[in-house]
Image (cartoon, rainbow, N blue to C red):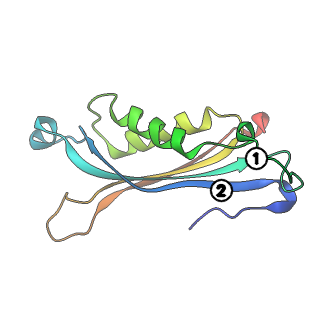
């Protein structure tokens, strides 16, 4: 369930997969007492007005920097205890959409150690820039 790049509309996909962080996340007493390992995936549909015609020297200013995307997710997670994975995913998506080139953001937050007999639980949200902003 990934976004698809679109050459005719000048769209590309920027993603971060499997970012593992320690987060203060959850409603249960043991989750409030200590951080737990989470996994974050972020996928962005990004507009590039110059693509695909832009051939030539690299221009860093044209791209959404995935290093910055990783830092953004880390900063949101470091912001303090959050009760719900939904809230954390929404905050990461909103932060990603602050870049005017990002049209859509899909964020997954997974708790891989929530249950001993389950590979992981979590939530995926998808948010888009308001139509009037496009």
Q: Secondary structure at mark 2?
A: strand
Q: Position of residue 40 (x, y in %)?
A: 40, 51
Residue found 39% across the figure and 38% down from its top:
74
Task: Please give left or right for residue 56 compared with residue 45 in the image.
Answer: right
Mark 2 or 1, which is nearer the eye? 1
Q: Is residue 86 visible?
A: yes
Instruction: Please name the residue shown 64% across and 48% down the image.
Output: 104
Which image quadrant: the C terminus? top right
Query: Image quadrant for the N terminus?
Result: bottom right
Work out whether 91 lies above or below 104. above
The image shows residue 43 at horizontal and vertical percentages of: 56, 54
Q: Position of residue 113 (x, y in %)?
A: 20, 59
The first of marks 2 and 1 along the sequence is 2
**Residue identifier under label 1:** 58
Q: Is residue 16 above or below residue 62?
A: below
In terms of secondary structure, where does tag 1 sit?
Answer: loop
The residue drawn where x is 76% and y is 54% is 11
Cα–Cα span, label 2 and label 1: 17 Å
Q: Residues within 10 Å of mark 1 (few under 14, many from 20)?
A: few
Quarter where residue 122 is shown: bottom left
Number of numbered discs: 2
- Mark 2, residue position: 13
Q: Residue furthest front?
A: 57
Q: Position of residue 33 (x, y in %)?
A: 10, 36
Residue at position x 64%, y 62% in the image: 3
């Amino acid at each position: 369930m990934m976004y698809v790049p679109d050459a005719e509309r000048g769209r590309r996909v920027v993603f971060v997969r499997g970012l593992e962080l320690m987060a203060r996340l959850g409603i249960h007493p043991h989750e409030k007492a200590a951080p737990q390992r989470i996994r974050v995936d972020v996928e962005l549909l990004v507009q590039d007005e110059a693509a695909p015609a832009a051939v030539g020297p690299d221009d860093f200013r044209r791209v959404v920097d995935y290093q910055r995307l990783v830092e953004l997710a880390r900063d949101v997670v470091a912001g303090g205890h959050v009760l719900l994975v939904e809230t954390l995913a929404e905050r990461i998506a909103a932060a990603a959409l602050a870049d005017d080139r990002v049209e859509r953001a899909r964020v997954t937050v997974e708790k891989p150690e929530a249950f001993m007999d389950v590979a992981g639980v979590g939530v995926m949200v998808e948010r888009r820039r308001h139509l009037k902003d496009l």
